[in-house]
Image: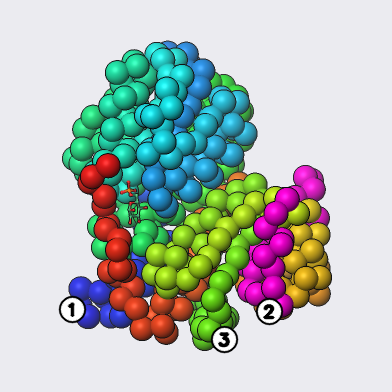
Amino acid sequence: SAAEKGGFDWFMRKEIYEQPRAVADTLLGRHTEDGSLTLDEIRIPEAELRTIQKIIIIAAGTSFYAGMVAKYAIEHWCRIPCEVELASEFRYRDPIVGPTTMVVAISQSGETADTLMAIRHAREQHARVLAICNTNGSTIPRESDAVIYTHAGPEIGVASTKGFTTQLAACYLLGLYLAQVKNTMFGDEIASVMKELEGIPPLMQQVLDDSQVVVDLAARLIDQPSVLFLGRHVGYPVALEGALKLKEIAYLHAEGFAAGELKHGPIAIIEEGMPVFVVVPPRGRDQLHEKVISNIQEVRARGARPIVLAEQDDTFVEQFASTVIRLPKVSTILQPLVAIIPLQIFACELATQLGHDVDQPRNLAKSVTVE
Ligand code: G6P
């Protein structure tokens, strides 16, 4: 009923709008007065965590893309080699896993069969298993050594939204916690990232409040047969997740690419007028921003319509864009928390305008409990 949906037409839309609250709840109570992180649910002793030499993140669907973002954060902050693997691939390739491996299973439902089978395999090889999960008492956390719960609340829409952003928040917490345990960051550095993280929910709200441009865009792009998404660094998994949302609920052909890979193939499919979303990283000391700008020029030169997601004061990108979607100022590694929101809204809006059942898309299940 409409009441259950809090006045929204779809659960998915309601869940998109719940994200500032869901992320804030996930971050709540995770550190002490002096700024040090306390992840009470991690019952793997710190001494044992210090012996970890490799992390393998295992997940499916949207959770896999959260895992891709986590890899950038964990390697950058903790200097622990980190792989991300699709749960359905992991078990069947004889992975190298042992007592000094930590397997991180990310699952909103905690019941995905592929992910569950993967952690069972990892435990047989004596790995430590940590779950990041939204469902209390579900199978995956029950079969793990430790768990970080996300506090998104029940997610009803089949296409995951607040599930994703709260997983990102939990992954950042894990990365900072491991950096604290392994001493790869100074305490004040950890505290300052934590402070930025805690300031993000109001910025997510700002993105929601400014979403009219995305709604208008969906109305204009309703007849498009195909939409592309580009990003680099953590913008790459955001591009993949943006494309997945469109496939799931709008049944459109949508693909995400690492912007740097364009020239190695994907650029050949660009056609006149094709909408290409581009996630632009903040300007910084690295060259990411310039690199992405040149990728925008490449697709534009071939007739594409670049729809650019960029920091609000990044006026430089305007000349290269056909539409600009403004993002609040945040550091690169945390940008997925705000950058994904317009892409979720775009998919939800387009699917609604196409007359699809947004909450119950054809052929999909909320949790896939068979392999
Ligand atoms: C299904 C859902 C997706 C979800 C994936 C992983 O395919 O339709 O939305 O991302 O499973 O689910 P999990 O519960 O393990 O995160």
Q: How busy is the neighbourhood of tag 2: few (under 14 within 10 Å), some, or many (20 plus)?
A: few
The answer to whether the residue bearing label 1 lies less than 8 angstroms from the nearest atom of ligand 1 is no
- From mark 1 to mark 3, how far is it between C-alphas? 30 Å
Q: Is residue 274 visible?
A: yes
For marks 3 and 2, the one nearer the N-term is: 3
Mark 2 element type: loop
Magenta stretch, residue numbers: 264-290
Q: Which residue is mark 2?
A: 273
Task: Reply yes or no: does residue 17 show up in magenta.
Answer: no
**Three-letter amino acid code at the position of disc 1:** Ser
Front-lying residue, 43 or 348: 348
Q: 325 left or right of 297?
A: left
| Residue 144 position (above or below residue 172) | above
Q: 60 left or right of 183?
A: left
For marks 1 and 2, the one nearer the N-term is: 1
Mark 3 element type: helix
Q: Which residue is mark 1?
A: 1
